[in-house]
């Protein structure tokens, strides 16, 4: 609709060279009395042509004495022209002007006939395509990305304009090609285009010749820009634009074959007069990635690229790549901004509503940002970290009348964004709302960064220009603001590799930020850091091993080549699940085809099924049973689709009780996985035919999955749910909640049937009510809790073997038999035949039988560990004299029971031996020696100095509480030394332990083994949560993409096969083409430029008020001090 409206307005504005069009423009838009409204009495164009003939007659007379260029360029001659036309019009009858009487009148405020003549003449000479576009943008409100051409100018020029929407133009001199589009990646299509025939000489000229380099020009969409591209100057021997615009400097492009003239809407901007300085070189530029070659299956190609892309991102973040990595350079700039924020926290000067780190994006990018913000917030509770939709930010800050964020706490008064670190997550780097935010938020903070697919994106261009606009011409390299996955533009709309790559980059960024904060004790204390260096080592090890796990899931090597021979077992199971669900989806289409064949065959032949059988058996048509036979045949015709579906299910051995309707897939997992997988699957089936359509839903099985979806469960609903690895003590309850949700959904039955559910996870325990369980290989070392389970199993096996050996009833001829664990555990579930990745990672201890435990059994096992530790601690406490209130008793009560909130004051009083209300280091040391602390003198001194912020050598009660919160004394755990470089920064190295916690065990061997092991298990809970959110969840997402791709592929191939390609469609496309960067947004960006100026002014005013207030308070303080000094002297 908008395009048609713009075309209609341009058709009225483009009048150069035609008096009829010029007269119509004058009446419609040029006069004070012009009105744009439906009017049945409005003159026809033939009437305007008749008026135009009078202008042509006068022009022909004037051309006898003057040149056309002279008439065009001199306003006096134009006025004379108008007067001569006026005299002719006045001599004519009123019939010619009667239809214009409501527009041409001598009344006050009206338009005279002379004004009409002047406007018509000026429109005839000036209103070319460039002028028309400028006039439209000057009077229009909104955001536009325009490509304007006219049949009158199509042989020589085209006009492009951008305001609020992007527009890029690429020039390929060697190929004689110009590409333009609203997305930067689109215009790179010319890089893959070759001439037909012999073009060796043409292409050879580009070697080292900058004049023949392919270049791209990005129009200034923020301030508004119009450009005309004209290639007709040499042919027509006249300027490309009309007189009012000939003051603009033309730029020669395409080796002089093309003239480009640019108009900037904003007078406040100053662009480089050399257009070449604004252009980006596409050839011989290592930062520019060409478009990927076309593939037969773009979705599969993206999925198979995931391990390679993730490995490349990991390698770029290694320490030895710091000097060569663009991401590490950007991370260095981020650390400088983060240091300023953290120093403000240390000094206590942070605004109470200030946000330290804000992430923003749309759709999948936002969901990934939300998970990143959640992990970072849990790691550093005192920081304020938020993830907010770009549409909300644009609505709140980018509109003259703000769009309220209903249902959310986001509002200008709740967010203080001055100097906030803002990370924009946008894979395409040009999505409308994030792009507008990249411009808008520059007025509130300079700490802007972007996570995108490549260096060359629209948002990247805006952020690179920030320093140049500030006049900082040096050290732009050290102000890098772009984190890139180097995935490049992916034409497939279902997002797979872009999601995995962005999640991988955010994982490495999370590690970098955590290591930076932990490297400084002041920052660690001010942020109340929960994460530890050991957690980072564990996460990095899992991160490195994750590549092998992804290869196993997808069935490719790191070089994106399929496995030689058979695919992996995991890949085969995932694809088999996809094939099964594809059969569910296609059954209606297949039944329709079978019904079609049956009806046509029986009707044409005249022998329906029952009648044909009866006839073959000798039945006569005159028999009285004819009507009964016809009744049976009519019933078959009526229920033929259902009969065919049952036949298909019998042949394919599928459930017969499923409803014979369109299918619904419900996806359950943690939010980012469920939402991203839902978007992936819905786009896979976006173009499928309605008979094989699919309804896709998602939910969090640990939260609202049951409430939102179980009432919709019917026979044949398809449920796929990701399970956290409950073998980890921190996740056992989470897996139990997920299993309960799946069981509740699977237990809802009708006619003996229920939904068909599949679970994907790492804990190899099959739920009884689910149809299938797909178990991913561990591909990582064991955590300490898993190691303790293995040790318990080995101990139980040994005890069972010894008891069996010494049992009188079992001693007869059994000692020579080989040990068979299945005879010891006859009632247990199936045994794992191979304990994946355990043997090659840790062979120091290995049970003969590896048990599969349910989530409930795992919770019970870990509760048994805790109860055993509590019983031992309780028996130890009973041996003490409970009547004595000594330092040892108080400390043991507080430390061992870990109830700091109840005993902190009593503990502080007990440690304060001299009773002065402060705790000296000597008092702290003496109490530690009484407790036989495992920490050395130097370690105790380090802990004491860590919280002694003022360096007084004494701790007050608040500092003592801070020490309890940030130190590991409350658990009595001795930590290994930190791995730092010469600058004191923590180096993120993967753990080299056989199992996670091995080193901690060695450092704490002096304590009771059960107590220390249980405390160490609890100390790993946070690293286990990070493993789930950063590593295991990514594996489950990739596994779901493999299943869904196989579903979509089978359905796509079916329609192409049965129709010989005529009904084929592409599952990598959707009808809305939502992966295009200029995706329509619910929030307009038309006011961004004005709002930027408003926010910049507001920031300056607030800063000025702050400076004045600070100066006044300082002056008042000094004045009060002087007065008090004078009073003291007088006294």
Image (spheres, helix red, strand yellow):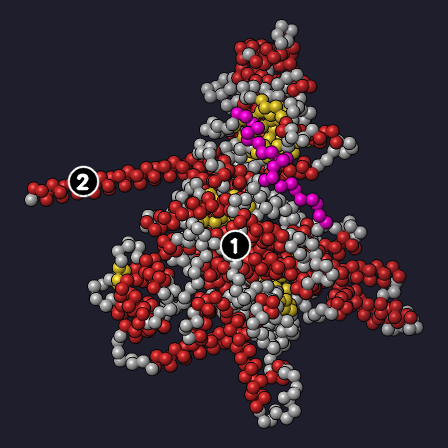
Asked if the magenta segment contains residue 1102, the reply would be: no
x and y percentages locating residue 434 in the rendered image:
51, 44
Classify 898 as above or below 1032. Answer: below
Tell me the residue at 61%/7% (across/down): 66
Q: Pointer 2: what residue?
A: 1119
x and y percentages locating residue 498 in the rendered image:
59, 50
Tell me the residue at 65%/48% (across/down): 492
**Comes first in the chain, label 2 or label 1:** 1
In depth, the one of 822 and 262 nearer the eye is: 822
Residues in magenta? 273-296
Q: Nearer the viewer, mark 2 or mark 1?
A: 1
x and y percentages locating residue 630 in the rendered image:
83, 68
Q: Pointer 1: what residue?
A: 507
Question: Left or right: where does residue 288 sit relative to residue 331?
Answer: right
Q: Residues within 10 Å of mark 1 (few under 14, many from 20)?
A: many
Say whether marks 2 and 1 touch (CB < 8 Å).
no
Classify 284 as above or below 818. Answer: above
Tell me the residue at 56%/32% (across/down): 219
Asked if the magenta segment contains residue 290, the reply would be: yes
């Amino acid at each position: 609709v908008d395009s048609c409206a713009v075309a209609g307005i341009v058709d009225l504005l483009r009048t150069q060279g035609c008096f009829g069009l010029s007269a119509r423009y004058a009446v419609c838009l040029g006069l004070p009395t012009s009105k744009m409204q439906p009017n049945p009495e409005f003159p026809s164009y033939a009437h305007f042509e008749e008026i135009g003939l009078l202008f042509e007659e006068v022009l022909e007379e004037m051309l006898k004495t003057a040149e056309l260029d002279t008439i065009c360029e001199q306003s006096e001659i134009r006025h004379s022209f108008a007067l001569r036309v006026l005299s002719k019009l006045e001599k004519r009858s009123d019939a010619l002007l009667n239809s214009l009487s409501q527009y041409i009148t001598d009344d006050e405020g009206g338009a005279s006939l002379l004004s009409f003549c002047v406007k018509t003449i000026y429109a005839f000479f000036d209103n070319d395509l460039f002028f028309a576009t400028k006039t439209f943008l000057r009077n229009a409100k909104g955001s536009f990305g325009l490509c304007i051409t006219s049949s009158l100018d199509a042989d020589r020029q085209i006009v492009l304009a951008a305001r609020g929407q992007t527009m890029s133009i690429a020039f390929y001199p060697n190929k004689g090609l110009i590409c333009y589009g609203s997305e930067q990646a689109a215009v790179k299509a010319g890089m893959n285009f070759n001439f037909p025939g012999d073009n060796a000489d043409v292409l050879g000229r580009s070697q080292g010749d900058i004049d023949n380099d392919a270049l791209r020009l990005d129009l200034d969409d923020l301030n508004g820009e119009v450009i005309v591209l004209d290639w007709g100057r040499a042919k027509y021997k006249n300027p490309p634009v009309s007189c009012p615009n000939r003051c603009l400097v033309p730029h020669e492009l395409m080796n002089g074959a093309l003239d480009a003239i640019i108009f900037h809407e904003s007078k406040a901007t100053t662009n480089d007069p050399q257009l070449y300085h604004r252009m980006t070189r596409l050839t011989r530029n290592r930062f520019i990635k060409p478009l990927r070659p076309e593939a037969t299956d773009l979705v599969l190609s993206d999925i198979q690229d995931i391990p390679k892309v993730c490995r490349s991102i990991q390698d770029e973040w290694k320490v030895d790549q710091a000097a060569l990595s663009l991401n590490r350079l950007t991370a260095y700039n981020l650390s400088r901004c983060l240091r300023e924020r953290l120093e403000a926290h240390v000094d206590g000067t942070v605004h109470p509503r200030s946000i330290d780190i804000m992430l923003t994006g749309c759709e999948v990018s936002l969901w990934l940002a939300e998970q990143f913000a959640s992990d970072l917030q849990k790691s550093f509770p005192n920081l304020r970290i938020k993830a907010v939709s770009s549409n909300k930010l644009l609505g709140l800050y980018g509109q003259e009348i703000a769009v309220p964020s209903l249902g959310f706490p986001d509002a200008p008064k709740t967010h203080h964004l001055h100097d906030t670190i803002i990370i924009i997550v946008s894979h395409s780097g040009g999505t409308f709302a994030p792009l507008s935010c990249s411009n808008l938020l520059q007025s509130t903070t300079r700490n802007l960064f972007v996570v995108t697919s490549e260096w060359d994106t629209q948002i990247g261009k805006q952020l690179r220009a920030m320093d140049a606009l500030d006049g900082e011409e040096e050290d732009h390299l050290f102000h890098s603001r772009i984190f890139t996955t180097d995935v490049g533009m992916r034409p497939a709309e279902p997002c797979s590799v872009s999601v995995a790559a962005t999640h991988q980059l955010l994982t490495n960024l999370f590690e970098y930020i955590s290591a930076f904060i932990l490297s400084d004790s002041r920052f660690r204390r001010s942020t109340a850091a929960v994460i530890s260096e050991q957690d980072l080592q564990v996460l990095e090890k899992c991160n490195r091993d994750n590549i092998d796990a992804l290869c196993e899931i997808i069935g490719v090597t790191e070089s994106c080549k399929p496995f030689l021979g058979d695919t992996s077992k995991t890949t085969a199971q995932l694809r088999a699940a996809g094939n099964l669900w594809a059969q569910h989806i296609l059954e209606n289409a297949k039944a329709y085809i079978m019904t079609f064949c049956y009806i046509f065959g029986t009707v044409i032949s005249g022998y329906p099924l029952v009648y044909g059988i009866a006839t073959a058996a000798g039945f006569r048509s005159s028999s009285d049973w004819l009507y009964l036979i016809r009744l049976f045949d009519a019933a078959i015709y009526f229920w033929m689709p259902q009969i065919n579906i049952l036949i298909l299910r019998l042949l394919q051995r599928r459930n017969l009780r499923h409803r014979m309707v369109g299918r619904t897939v419900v996806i359950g997992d943690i939010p980012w996985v469920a939402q991203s997988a839902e978007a992936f699957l819905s786009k896979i089936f976006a173009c499928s035919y309605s008979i094989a359509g699919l309804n896709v839903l998602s939910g969090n099985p640990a939260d609202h999955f049951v409430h939102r979806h179980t009432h919709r469960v019917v026979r044949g609903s398809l449920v796929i749910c990701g399970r956290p690895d409950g073998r980890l003590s921190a996740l056992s309850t989470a897996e139990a909640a997920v299993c309960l949700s799946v069981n509740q959904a699977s237990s809802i039955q009708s006619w003996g049937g229920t939904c068909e559910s599949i679970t994907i996870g790492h804990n190899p325990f099959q739920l009884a009510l689910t149809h299938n369980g797909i178990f991913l290989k561990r591909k990582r070392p064991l955590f300490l809790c898993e190691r303790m389970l293995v040790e318990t199993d080995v101990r139980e096996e040994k005890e069972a073997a010894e008891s069996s050996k010494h049992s009188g009833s079992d001693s007869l001829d059994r000692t020579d038999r080989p040990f068979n664990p299945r005879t010891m555990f006859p009632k247990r579930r199936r045994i794992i035949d191979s304990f994946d990745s355990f043997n090659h990672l840790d062979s120091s201890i290995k049970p003969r039988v590896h048990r599969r435990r349910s989530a409930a059994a795992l919770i019970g096992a870990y509760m048994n560990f805790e109860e055993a530790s509590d019983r031992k601690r309780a028996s130890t406490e009973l041996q003490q004299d409970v009547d004595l209130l000594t330092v040892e008793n108080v400390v043991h009560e507080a430390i061992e029971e870990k109830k700091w909130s109840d005993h902190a004051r009593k503990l502080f009083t007990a440690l304060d031996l001299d009773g002065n209300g402060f705790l000296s280091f000597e008092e702290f040391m003496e109490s530690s020696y009484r407790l036989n602390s495992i920490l050395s003198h130097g370690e105790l001194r380090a802990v004491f100095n860590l919280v002694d912020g003022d360096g007084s050598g004494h701790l007050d009660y608040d500092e003592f509480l801070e020490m309890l919160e940030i130190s590991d004394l409350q658990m009595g755990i001795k930590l290994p030394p930190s791995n730092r470089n010469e600058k004191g920064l923590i180096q993120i190295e993967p753990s080299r332990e056989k199992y996670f916690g091995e080193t901690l065990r060695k450092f704490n061997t002096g304590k009771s083994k059960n107590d220390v092991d249980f405390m160490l298990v609890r100390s790993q809970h946070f690293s286990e949560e990070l493993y789930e959110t950063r590593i295991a969840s990514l594996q489950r997402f990739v596994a779901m993409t493999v299943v869904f791709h196989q579903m979509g592929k089978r359905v796509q191939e079916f329609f192409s096969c049965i129709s010989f390609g005529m009904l084929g469609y592409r599952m990598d496309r959707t009808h809305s083409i939502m992966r295009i960067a200029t995706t329509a947004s619910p929030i307009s960006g038309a006011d961004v430029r004005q709002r930027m100026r408003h926010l910049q002014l507001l920031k300056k005013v607030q800063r000025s008020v702050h400076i004045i207030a600070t100066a006044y308070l300082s002056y008042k303080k000094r004045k009060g001090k002087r007065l008090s000094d004078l009073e003291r002297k007088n006294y």
